[in-house]
């Protein structure tokens, strides 16, 4: 504990370290979603197909998820401040190279390297913030960091939309460069490293573990990101990579439990609270990234909004979460059990999804979303810090860093699972609802005939001949059926997402928390 206390900072030095760490976390998280709105422009400039340009997102996510579990070990090998500074430099240099890329695969390669630099920023920045605060203020440190994690994914689309509308897509990468340079200089000047035990020598480095980890999570991330596009197991690539992920996981677990100096310390999962926390982190990632993905998709594809309008819709909810963070931090410091707050957050998240189920139509107004998204903001605020504190509350020393890496990776994988399952479910439900609606459209039904006739007359009044007007009427009717089927599919997603969160509530309440115990955290990731 004395080692941890020796890292506590005071006054302006602590403020500078906090700002540096939050800047780095925001850089990484905003870059996860900022490219979503620029993909069309990238396709045009680089002459890429839709599938190829999708790799700009996938490569970054794979780089991220490979490096997160290894950050605790890498910090130990190279010293935390050195590793943190090197990660910022890698991220910043790759941002410049991404902006300068002249071909799609060149951009994808630099995005992968940028993801490797970025994954380290998240886990390490929270460690640095939390250890800079004395024990009694660590709940508040969690809240400060949580602001960046929750607001980051929401800031990406409106910021990306604004840059693409007013400049060109390379600038979504170039804006990282000045921030990265400042953060590197501040890190080298102010961030200190804890004194670890002996570093691993060459023969002690778990090279096989590193390789198996990269194969396992890289393959799994690819399967999740590309499964729906490639029709899942009908694609030989998806099938081979799924087998690689399963076998990789099996041999990775064997290696890490038998090797004397493992790259990921799996034994830390013997801790009951951490096991529960990793599952809850997965579910939270599922809900956080799933809802951040589906709402802009619905507003753009069904309601015809621009990327910037869709992004701005999420801002009030993010500000609500920001407002909630310090309040939740204070409640935890006063000894309110984490599991009660997590259960409350899950109930509120279910309220948000059921609310969405009831308000979705082919022409829902932007005002209808406001209070629903505020409820989501409050729910997310009640989930993030309590899940993190619950996960790490009974760990000590180096175990905290190892536990943090697990919760970080599970949140990321939860998001990937969420987006993959939602896209698959949407397309399947869409076909079901469409065939169901079409079966009810009987051409001999007087109501259907009247509707087609009214549309035909409308087209004739605009100067069409009778045959062309009739054809246009049936095309319009088909379009209306497709749109209604899509809306019903989105409603189903909201409904089942709510059910998942409600089912988890009783299990959360059964978890043993640390009633009345002050929070003692050292890190918690992504």
Image (tube, rainbow, N blue to C red):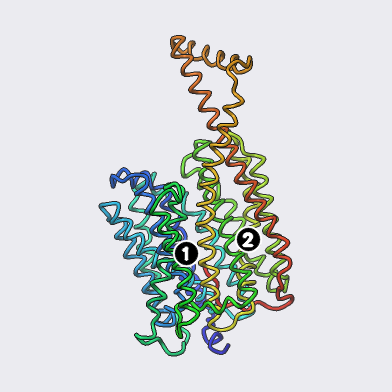
State left or right for residue 32 relative to residue 351.
Answer: left
Question: Which residue is at a point 37% across and 63% down the rendered structure image?
Answer: 114
Q: Of callouts 1 and 2, which one flags the residue occurring earlier in the amino acid sequence? A: 1
Residue nearest the viewer, comparing 252 with 188:
252
For this rendering, which residue is in front, 323 or 460?
A: 460
The residue that mark 1 highlights is 246
Query: Under tag 1, what secondary structure?
Result: helix
Tell me if mark 1 has few (under 14), some (14-19) or many (20+) residues whose alpha carbon lies within 10 angstroms of its own.
some
| Residue 31: percent from left, percent from top | 43, 58
Q: Say which of 64 and 38 sits in front.
A: 64
Residue 145, image x and y in percent?
54, 68
Q: Nearer the viewer, mark 1 or mark 2?
A: 1
Q: Where does the image place residue 243, in percent across and percent down from the top left?
A: 44, 61
SS for callout 2:
helix
Q: Quadrant of the N terminus?
A: bottom right
Determine which quarter of the picture holds residue 112: bottom left
Asked if 526 appears above or below 85 in the picture, the reply is above
Q: Which mark is residue 381?
A: 2
Image point 43% across, 53% down: which residue?
34
Would you say 12 lies left or right of 42 here?
Answer: right
């Amino acid at each position: 504990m004395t080692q941890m206390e020796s890292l506590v900072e005071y006054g302006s030095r602590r403020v500078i370290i906090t700002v540096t760490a939050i800047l780095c976390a925001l850089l990484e998280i905003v870059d996860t979603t900022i490219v979503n709105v620029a993909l069309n422009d990238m396709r045009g400039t680089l002459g890429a197909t839709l599938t190829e340009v999708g790799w700009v997102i996938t490569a970054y996510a794979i780089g991220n998820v490979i490096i997160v579990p290894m950050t605790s070990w890498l910090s130990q090998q190279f010293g935390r401040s050195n590793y943190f500074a090197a990660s910022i430099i890698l991220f910043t240099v790759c941002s410049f190279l991404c902006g300068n890329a002249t071909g799609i695969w060149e951009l994808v390669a630099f995005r992968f390297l940028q993801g490797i630099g970025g994954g380290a920023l998240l886990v390490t920045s929270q460690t640095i913030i939390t250890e800079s605060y004395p024990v009694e203020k660590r709940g508040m440190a969690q809240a400060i960091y949580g602001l960046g994690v929750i607001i980051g994914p929401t800031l990406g689309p409106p910021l990306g939309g604004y840059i693409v509308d007013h400049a060109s897509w390379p600038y979504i990468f170039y804006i990282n460069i000045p921030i990265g340079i400042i953060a590197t200089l501040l890190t080298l000047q102010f961030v200190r490293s804890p004194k670890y035990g002996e570093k691993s020598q060459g023969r002690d480095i778990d090279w096989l573990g590193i390789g198996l980890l990269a194969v396992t999570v890289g393959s799994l991330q690819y399967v999740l990101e590309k499964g729906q596009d490639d029709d899942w197991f009908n694609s030989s690539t998806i099938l081979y990579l799924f087998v690689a992920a399963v076998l990789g996981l099996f041999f990775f677990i064997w290696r890490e439990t038998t090797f004397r100096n493992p790259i990921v310390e799996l034994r830390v999962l013997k801790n009951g609270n951490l096991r529960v926390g990793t599952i809850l982190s997965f579910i939270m990632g599922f809900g956080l990234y799933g809802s951040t993905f589906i709402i802009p998709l619905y507003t753009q594809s069904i309601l015809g909004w621009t990327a910037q309008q869709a992004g701005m819709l999420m801002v009030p909810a993010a500000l609500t979460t920001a407002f909630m963070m310090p309040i939740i931090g204070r409640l935890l410091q006063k000894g309110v059990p984490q599991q009660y707050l997590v259960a409350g957050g899950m109930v509120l998240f279910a309220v948000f999804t059921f609310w969405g189920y009831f308000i979705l139509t082919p022409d829902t107004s932007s005002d209808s979303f406001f209070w629903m998204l505020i409820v989501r903001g409050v729910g997310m605020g009640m989930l993030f810090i309590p899940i993190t504190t619950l996960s790490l509350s009974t760990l000590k020393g180096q175990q905290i860093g190892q536990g943090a890496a697990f919760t970080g990776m599970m949140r990321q994988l939860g998001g990937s699972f969420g987006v993959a399952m939602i896209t698959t479910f949407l397309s399947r439900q869409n076909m079901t609802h469409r065939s169901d609606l079409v079966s009810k459209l009987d051409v001999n039904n007087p109501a259907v005939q009247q509707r087609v006739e009214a549309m035909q007359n409308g087209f004739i009044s605009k100067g069409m001949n009778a045959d062309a007007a009739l054809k246009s009427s049936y095309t319009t009717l088909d379009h209306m059926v497709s749109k209604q089927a899509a809306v019903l599919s989105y409603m189903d997603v909201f409904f089942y997402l709510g059910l998942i969160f409600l089912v988890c509530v009783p299990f959360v309440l059964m978890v043993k928390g640390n009633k009345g115990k002050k929070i003692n955290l050292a890190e918690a990731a992504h």
